[in-house]
Image (cartoon, rainbow, N blue to C red):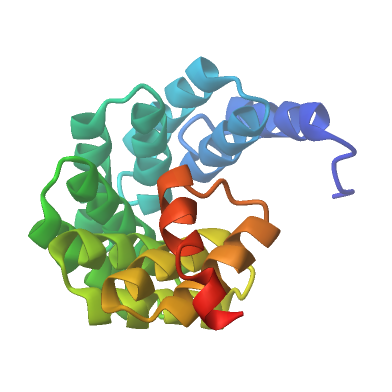
Amino acid sequence: MPKAKNAEEYIARQQVAIAGNPDCGVSRYNLAVALLGLKKYDEAEKELIATIHCSPNLAEAYVQLGGLCLQRDDLDGCMAYNQQAVKVRAGFSEGHGNIGFVHLQKGEIDEAIRSLQKAIRWNPNFLQAYATLANAYLIKGLIDESIQTNLKVLELEPSFAIAHNNLAIVYLEKGKYDLAIKHVDKAVELGYEVAPELLKEIQAFRKEFE
């Protein structure tokens, strides 16, 4: 079949496929993802719900539904859908990562750390999970663990600005002011909006290391 020229044509093809086989969860999921790409969230949500009725083990559909809940600030809904995702596929790293993120938003730091550690066990290259885990360690006061995890983020993606910002914070905590300066400068260079308080605090040590 020739490649679809655009999203609307792709959507039309999925709709034709669904008309021919209404119980095909994969076609419904593909349609939902295309609708999400066009920001047609209500239509996408209907298709995702239809997807899990047709294919209850399609973990990706639960994660997408969780994402829609998150857009509405419905943390409990996001958590429930992602828990369902890892129930149907235990090793689904994205589900564990999202569960960890929701726990962190709710202030449940230990639970967040456990879920995020699971996420990176299943996917050792899961950049966002490492970044969220580094934040959780920082909040917990586990400074060395936060440093190691942020460094892992930069190993995977050297221009990940949030990790440079977070390293500036943790190195400041450790009294390693030269490293704090280096990473805050990199975060700014990459376009990250560093908190004015952090910039001011680090500025105080610049003369020492110039």
Q: How many marks?
A: 0
| Left or right for 175, reference 39 | left
* Residue 24: percent from left, percent from top: 50, 39
Task: Pick whichever, 194 or 153, lies toward us.
Answer: 194
Seen at 58% across and 31% down, the residue is 36
* Residue 144: percent from left, percent from top: 25, 82
Seen at 31% across and 25% down, the residue is 73
* Residue 150: percent from left, percent from top: 41, 74
Which corner quadrant of the image does residue 124 belong to? Answer: bottom left
* Residue 57: percent from left, percent from top: 32, 51
Seen at 79% across and 26% down, the residue is 8
Quick check: 106 above or below 48? below
Quick check: 122 above or below 107? below
| Left or right for 65, reference 30 | left
Residue 125: in sight, yes or no? no
Task: Pick whichever, 41 or 16, lies toward us.
Answer: 41
Task: Pick whichever, 104 or 185, lies toward us.
Answer: 185
Pick out the residue farthest to the front.
207
| Left or right for 188, reference 137 | right
Quick check: 9 above or below 162? above
Which corner quadrant of the image does residue 159 belong to? Answer: bottom right
Residue 210: in sight, yes or no? yes
Name the quadrant of the C terminus: bottom right
Task: Pick whichever, 39 or 192, lies toward us.
Answer: 192
Seen at 19% across and 39% down, the residue is 80
